[in-house]
Image (cartoon, rainbow, N blue to C red):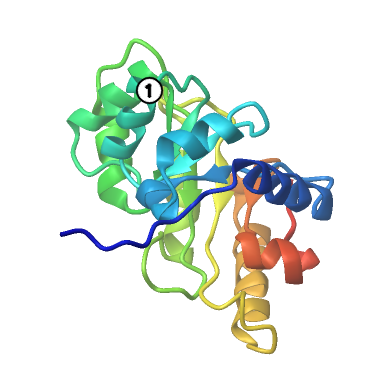
Amino acid sequence: MSRPCRALIDLDALRHNYRLACELAPNSQAIAVVKANAYGHGSVAAARALEPLAPALGVACIEEALELRAAGITQPILLLEGIFSADEVNVAAAENFWLMVENLEQVQHIISAKLANPVHCWLKIDTGMHRLGLLPEQVDDALAILKASDNVQQEIIVASHFSSADEINNPSTEAQIECFDTVLANCDQSKGLAQSLSNSAAVLAHPKAHRQ
C-alpha cells in the first residue's frame, strides 16, 4: 500500500525562478542544474521546461546526462562531477557533454583519449569546500596541459563551489571568493578565461561572486 501524499511540481514557477536568477545577475549566464532527478522534482520534465531558457543544463554524472539525451534534450549538458572512467571522455565528445575537471586523473584521461571532436572543459578549483577540485598550486599546470591538448576546446572555464553561501553571516564565502581571485591573479594560464563561481545562494546574497 503506497503513501497517499504526492508532490505537484509547478513548471511555470520553476521557469519564473530561473528568470529571476538571471535578472539578479544580468551580466552573467546561469546553468540550470537538474542533477539528482532535478533534486527529486523530475529531471526530464524540469530539463524540458528550462531548456529554452538556459544556455546549458547541469547534472552530476554521465548516466544522468544520457537520460536527458534519450528524452530528446539537445542543449549542452555539464557533468558537474566530470568523468569517472577514461571511456566516458569519448561519450562526452559524441554527445556534447561538457566536462568539469576536478583532479589530475581526469586531466590525463581527457588528453589521452582519441577523439574526433574536442570536448569543452571547466576546471574546478578547491577554494575551501574541500570536497572536489584541484588544489590552488595545481591549477596553472593543469590549465597548461589542457590548453596544449587538441582534445580540449580552448574556451576553458574556471570554477569553484561555495560551502556555505546560504549562511549570510558565514565568513567562509568571502574567504572562498578571495582565494579564487588570488589563485587566478597568480595563474598565468587563467588570463582571459571565463569564470563560474555562484551557486543559487550566492546569486541571491553575494553579488561579488557574480562572474562572466
Residue 11 point in image, percent of width and height? 60, 42
Image point (71%, 61%), residue name: 203
Query: Would residue 18 be seen by someone viewing this image from the given angle?
Result: yes
Tell me the quadrant of the picture where the N terminus can be found: bottom left
Question: Taking 67 as reference, is 191 above or below it?
Answer: below
Q: Quadrant of residue 115?
A: top left
- On the image, numbered disc 1 is attached to which residue? 71
Amino acid on which the number 1 mark rests in the picture: Ala
Residue 97 point in image, percent of width and height? 41, 28
Whether residue 196 sits left or right of residue 93 in the image: it is: right
Whether residue 52 sits left or right of residue 160 in the image: it is: right
Residue 180 point in image, percent of width and height? 61, 65
Question: Taking 1 as reference, is 154 above or below it?
Answer: above
Q: Count of labels shown? A: 1
Whether residue 92 sits left or right of residue 53 in the image: it is: left
Q: Quadrant of residue 113?
A: top left
